[in-house]
Amino acid sequence: MRATISKLLCSAILVGLAATFAVGQAQSAASSDPNAVAFIDRALEALGGARAWRSLGAARLEGSIQEATAEAGKGYRFVSQHDWNSGQFQSRHDWTDEKGQPAQTYDPDQIHTRAQLAATQGLLRDPGSDAHTAFLPGALLSVIRNGKKYRISFPGHSSWLPAGQQQIDVYRVDDKDALHPNQVWIFSVETGLPLKTKVAVPGRYGIPLYKTITFNGFQTVKGLVLPKTISVAYPDRVRQVLTFDTIHLVPADSSTNVNSAR
């Protein structure tokens, strides 16, 4: 009888501990690390100020793109329009060739067979909406910081970064069981500026691959700091370089559209 009671007590204790652990996990999954959030706050200040980025609601970027695997001799251009007034990015992207004609593009994330790959020869890759949002790191970090859809934390493992760099991991709150971050940001400890971000691409067996967007130099536009050029490195090591030559910014309280400059 005593043995039975002891077993029941042990079982109750184990169940209680498991429940407590599960609740603790759920709470930690829904909350951000204040120190990691502070690091993003510092980055926003380095990019022109958190208030200044919150005052914007849309942007239009124009420029050129180079890709080693695209058809030789073609000078591609892009127009990338973004609207984040609602707290969530909505993007549209147009690509043209050297004659100003619409360029055919493809999404490498949707290529799964050799036949599909063969059909893309000579076509330009579209980095995809998930990567396009990182063209404006200040706007994206502002949405991550101020929205309720992301959890911000330091990595739970050694990230093997060079001295002077700090990694911040970003998870989607609605994906509480995620083992891997949706975005990985690398910042300069000295300046606070973002150096690169990695955006998850769904992979096999639930293990994501990442597109890496590297910010190559910065410029100041209307008091805000934006990258001059960016490079996009894909999981298969193909690389694109995008150069911004025209940037239009639209205030959040403006009645004009994204085609109007601030």
Image (tube, helix red, strand yellow):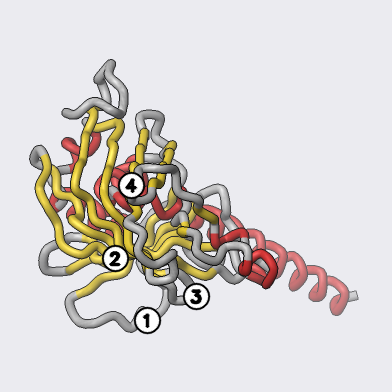
Secondary structure at numbered mark 3: loop
Residue at x-position 21% and y-position 35%: 248
Specify the quadrant that holds the C terminus: top left
Residue that mark 1 sits on: 158
Dot 4: few (<14), some (14–19), or many (≥20) neighbours within 10 Å?
A: some
Image location (x, y in percent) of residue 52: 16, 36
Residue that mark 3 sits on: 236
- The disc placed on residue 214 is 2
Q: Amino acid at mark 2?
A: Thr
Dot 3: few (<14), some (14–19), or many (≥20) neighbours within 10 Å?
A: few
Seen from the viewer's position, the closer of residues 206 and 2 is 206
Judge depth for marks 4 and 2 and give the one in front: 2
Secondary structure at numbered mark 1: loop
Judge depth for marks 3 and 2 and give the one in front: 3
Residue at x-position 24% and y-position 35%: 54
Residue that mark 4 sits on: 140
Q: Quadrant of residue 260?
A: top left
